[in-house]
Image (tube, rainbow, N blue to C red):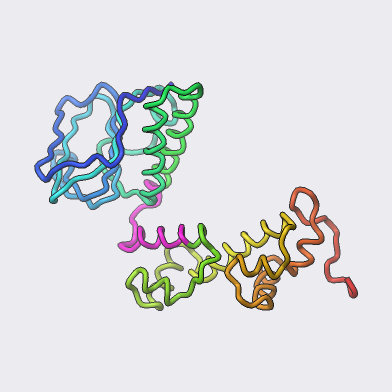
């Protein structure tokens, strides 16, 4: 069971902010920074950049403070006897980089809502959100060091997958990050294992498959909504990714959206 004692997102403090509790709390404390901060780790004071997370167990000494004009964080003080928390492999009292701060910030916003409103499913909703949050923390911890441009690249990739129909080009993406097109393509591939334009294409085809499954639009309308201004170009890319033309994909699928087995889509005259 989990019990939230207090949760806050975007907590903003002045430059003289210091949080010093030598005896620690009687429960867990989770802090995610949104600005640089100084943490005392193993007796030494060290500066960490924004988007770091630190987990304190009960009765562990706590010390951190601002190191700029303003200090902002999300934080959560809570009790829990759940195994995914009590036996976590995350380090105690040692900050590590968070790979998707925007995602985790949204989880904190939802935790604030669930904690402050007494809803019928409050307990299970809080547990679900904490499980997701700790999953994301685990992913971040085991990912290791992040590239300097990682957070900007992550936001770009989220924008691509959220709005695949936008007029994406390498030049446009590079300009938005103030990078050269060649450098963007290089670090994007190294970071995500796929080129930025392949990411655009895959996101567009994924959206196109959903439109074709709904079967309410013509192939030309699907192409336009997915960011293509040339239907022939759309058809070529769709077939390259899926192995089927859009029309035949739309025709030969069952009610679950899966292509029927043993269906020959390349028969002459079909």
Q: Nearer the viewer, residue 56 or 202?
A: 202
Most extreme residue toward the right is 269
Q: Nearer the viewer, residue 21 or 71?
A: 71
Q: Which residues are magenta?
A: 140-159
Q: Quadrant of the C terminus?
A: bottom right
Could you tell whether 4 is left or right of 64 in the image? right
Instruction: Tell me the quarter of the picture where residue 109 sits.
Output: top left
Instruction: Confirm whether the magenta stretch covers residue 142.
Output: yes
Could you tell whether 240 is left or right of 112 in the image? right
Q: Position of residue 57 (x, y in %)?
A: 29, 29
Q: Position of residue 209 (x, y in %)?
A: 68, 60
Q: Quadrant of the N terminus?
A: top left
Q: Position of residue 79 (x, y in %)?
A: 34, 23
Residue at image position (40%, 32%) is 113
Instruction: Tell me the quarter of the picture where residue 214 sits.
Output: bottom right
Residue at image position (23%, 52%) is 49
Residue at image position (20%, 50%) is 36
Could you tell whether 201 is left or right of 159 in the image? right
Instruction: Tell me the quarter of the picture where residue 234 sits.
Output: bottom right
Residue at image position (69%, 78%) is 232
Q: Nearer the viewer, residue 249 or 147?
A: 249
Q: Nearer the viewer, residue 217 or 125?
A: 217
Q: Position of residue 30 (x, y in %)?
A: 30, 35
Total labels drawn: 0
Instruction: Confirm whether the magenta stretch covers residue 16.
Output: no
Figure check: 28 above or below 255: above
The main secondary structure of the magenta stretch is helix
Figure check: 253 above or below 241: above
């Amino acid at each position: 069971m989990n019990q939230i004692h207090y949760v806050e997102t975007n907590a903003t403090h002045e430059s003289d902010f210091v949080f010093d509790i030598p005896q620690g709390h009687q429960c867990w404390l989770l802090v995610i920074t949104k600005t640089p901060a100084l943490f005392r780790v193993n007796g030494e004071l060290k500066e960490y950049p924004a988007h770091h997370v630190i987990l304190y167990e009960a009765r562990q000494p706590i010390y951190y403070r601002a190191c700029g004009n303003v200090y902002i964080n999300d934080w959560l003080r809570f009790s829990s006897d759940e195994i995914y928390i009590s036996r976590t492999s995350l380090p105690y009292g040692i900050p590590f980089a968070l790979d998707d701060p925007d995602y985790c910030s949204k989880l904190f916003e939802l935790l604030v809502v669930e904690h402050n409103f007494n809803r019928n499913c409050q307990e299970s909703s809080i547990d679900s959100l904490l499980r997701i949050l700790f999953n994301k923390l685990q992913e971040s911890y085991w990912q290791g060091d992040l590239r300097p441009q990682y957070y900007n690249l992550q936001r770009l990739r989220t924008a691509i997958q959220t709005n695949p129909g936008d007029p994406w080009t390498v030049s446009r993406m590079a300009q938005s990050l103030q990078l050269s097109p060649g450098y963007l393509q290089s670090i994007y591939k190294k970071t995500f294992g796929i080129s930025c334009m392949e990411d655009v294409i895959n996101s567009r085809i994924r959206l196109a498959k959903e439109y074709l499954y709904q079967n309410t639009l013509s192939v030309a309308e699907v192409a336009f909504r997915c960011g293509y201004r040339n239907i022939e170009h759309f058809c070529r890319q769709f077939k390259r990714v899926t192995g089927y033309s859009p029309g035949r994909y739309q025709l030969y699928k069952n009610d679950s959206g899966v292509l029927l087995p043993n269906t020959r889509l390349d028969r002459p005259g079909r």
